């Protein structure tokens, strides 16, 4: 297939806000692909090459946009092969070879293809929930149940591979995908709850109430002596967290998959600033790079040859307790089972006193819904917070002259479109944060203007707010009330940001 067909489909998907039309356009293209074209095309339509980042920035790539080819000749297979060679270029002479490869690729591309390649290779095609739209399109193209596609994807963590299995092997190939120790699954997520009383009333008495730690999500796999650790975005950090590896290696089991949180604690057992925890995630040098991390596990997905994903939570908690109870230091997240309203409120109070965010209430009869944010897990925090995408920033004035200050905030479009702007804020920014924004934002610039910088939608920031209000100023019809920066979330991608629906749910009345 010619690349131009992919470019045309991408443009059609971007031009409509209708989820149904997006799915139809994507499915129509997928049905036309040869088997070896499925994985690269699926990856591109979801917004990134299957080879990952190739190491060329916006400035380099935009400089390659020269006289375009008159007619489209590039094929999917040919472009994928070029990207594979680019990603593998290393050693002496690699910079020159990469420049040659990019020059050949862009020289053979039409104008529309050049623009597509620049956006693809710089991350501009990422559209948050487009991944979810792609899953529905795969199901439609392969004529298999959407739930079967989603489960296979959540267990494999690879969208291109899921598409290839569906389109070449159908439902049988998808159903054959199983949890594998050593291959991370996408984590189950908690949805926001209105209040502790409301969540308890909705889920009933058969629940657990656990601390919501002010830490970072981890998934740990052990197979014999080998232990590996991943973040919530399935980025492996094993080499940077040797203390976590040693603690799990000491547990009385042979194989296990654990879900939990990790964070740095001070001498009094209180959480250190979130950035102290995250500084370890970017290090390859282990515990010498910063504070020791403490793990707290709340779920087990596999134990000694038995998969527990489909077991009810109370069975998984029982298995977890048999594995980690009595361990030193404590590896179990604090919480209670089947609490009264008073006992649940006491857990929330204890979490807040200890410096954490709140609690998570979980239905004890629920299986582990990998990759989903449903009603079976609900988080309760005393302050509304949203994870939003930074779309731009304005140059400050007065005391903030010379600093990129007022940031533009976008919520995720659940139908795969660009993030939807819902407000601006400069509140909550320290001098250190202003300096970081001013140094960092230019690396993500998509457009420089006299008074502002527009950014590629890649950075996620946690925002506290008092609610939302209806507004005609922003395209989503809603605006944040008294928004203020809590912290940036390098552990999250735009696909993890809260949706415009979550913002609208905060409207009073």
Image (cartoon, grey):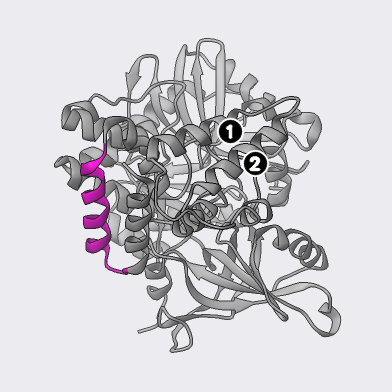
Q: Residue at x 70, y 71 (%)?
A: 428
Question: Between 386 and 3, which is closer to the camera in this rendering?
Answer: 3
Answer left or right for 28 relative to 7: left
* Corner quadrant of residue 226: top right
User: Would you say the residues marked 2 and 1 are in contact, meaning their CB atoms lie under 8 Å apart?
Assistant: yes
Q: Residue at x 17, y 32 (%)?
A: 171
Please give the residue where the numbered disc 2 appears in the rendered image: 55
Label 2 and label 1: CA atoms lie apart by 8 Å
Magenta segment, principal secondary structure? Answer: helix
| Residue 88 is covered by the magenta coloring | no
Please give the residue where the numbered disc 1 appears in the rendered image: 87
Q: Which residues are magenta?
A: 16-33
The relative height of residue 156 versus residue 134 in the rendered view (above or below) is above
Answer left or right for 66 relative to 182: right
Question: Between 506 and 164, which is closer to the camera in this rendering?
Answer: 164
Q: Is residue 234 visible?
A: yes
Q: Residue at x 35, y 65 (%)?
A: 198
* Residue 51 drawn at (x, y percent): 51, 35
* Corner quadrant of residue 166: top left
* Corner quadrant of residue 178: top left
* Residue 270 drawn at (x, y percent): 70, 47
Q: Quadrant of the N terminus?
A: top left
Count how many numbered circles sit on residues in the image: 2
Question: Between 374 and 53, which is closer to the camera in this rendering?
Answer: 53
Q: Is residue 346 visible?
A: no
| Residue 17 is covered by the magenta coloring | yes
The relative height of residue 59 versus residue 139 in the rendered view (above or below) is below
Q: Residue at x 56, y 71 (%)?
A: 409
* Residue 69 drawn at (x, y percent): 48, 53
């Amino acid at each position: 297939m010619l690349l131009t067909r992919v470019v045309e489909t991408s443009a059609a998907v971007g031009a409509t806000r209708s989820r149904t039309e997006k799915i139809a356009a994507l499915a129509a293209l997928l049905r036309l692909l040869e088997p070896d074209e499925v994985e690269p095309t699926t990856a591109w339509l979801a917004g990134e090459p299957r080879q990952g980042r190739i190491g060329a920035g916006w400035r380099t790539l935009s400089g390659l946009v020269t006289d375009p080819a008159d007619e489209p000749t590039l094929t999917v297979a040919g472009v994928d092969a070029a990207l594979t060679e680019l990603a593998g270029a290393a050693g002496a002479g690699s910079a020159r070879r990469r420049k040659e490869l990019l020059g050949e690729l862009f020289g053979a591309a039409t104008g529309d293809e050049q623009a597509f390649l620049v956006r693809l290779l710089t991350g501009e095609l990422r559209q948050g929930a487009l991944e979810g739209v792609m899953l529905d399109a795969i199901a439609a193209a392969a004529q298999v149940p959407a739930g079967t596609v989603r489960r296979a994807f959540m267990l494999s963590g690879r969208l291109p591979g899921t598409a290839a299995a569906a389109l070449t092997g159908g439902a049988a190939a998808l159903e054959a995908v199983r949890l594998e120790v050593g291959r991370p699954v996408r984590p189950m997520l908690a949805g926001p709850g209105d209040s502790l009383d409301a969540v308890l009333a909705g889920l009933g008495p058969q629940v657990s109430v656990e601390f919501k730690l002010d830490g970072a999500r981890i998934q740990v796999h052990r197979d014999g002596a080998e232990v590996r650790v991943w973040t919530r975005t399935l980025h492996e950090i094993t080499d940077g967290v040797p203390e976590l590896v040693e603690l799990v290696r000491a547990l009385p089991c042979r194989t296990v998959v654990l879900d939990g949180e990790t964070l740095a604690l001070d001498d009094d057992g209180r959480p250190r600033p979130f950035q102290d925890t995250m500084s370890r995630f970017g290090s390859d040098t282990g515990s010498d790079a910063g504070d020791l991390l403490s793990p707290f596990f709340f779920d087990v997905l596999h134990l000694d040859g038995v998969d527990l994903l489909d077991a009810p939570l109370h069975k998984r908690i029982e298995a977890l307790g048999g594995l980690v109870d009595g361990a030193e230091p404590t590896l179990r997240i604090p919480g209670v089972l089947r609490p009264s309203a008073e006992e649940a409120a006491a857990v929330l109070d204890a979490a807040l006193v200890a410096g954490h965010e709140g609690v998570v209430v979980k239905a004890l009869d629920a299986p582990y819904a990998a990759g989903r944010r449903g009603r079976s897990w609900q988080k309760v925090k005393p302050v509304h917070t949203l994870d939003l995408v930074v779309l731009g920033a304005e140059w400050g004035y007065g005391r903030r002259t010379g600093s990129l200050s007022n940031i533009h905030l976008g919520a995720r479009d659940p139908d795969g479109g660009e993030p939807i702007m819902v407000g601006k804020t400069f509140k909550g920014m320290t001098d250190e944060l202003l300096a970081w924004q001013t140094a960092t934002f230019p690396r993500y610039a998509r457009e420089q203007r006299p008074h502002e910088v527009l950014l590629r939608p890649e950075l996620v920031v946690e925002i506290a707010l008092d609610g939302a209000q209806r507004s005609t100023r922003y395209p989503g019809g809603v605006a944040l009330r008294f928004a203020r920066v809590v912290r940036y979330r390098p552990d999250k991608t735009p696909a993890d940001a809260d949706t415009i629906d979550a913002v609208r749910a905060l409207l009073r009345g």
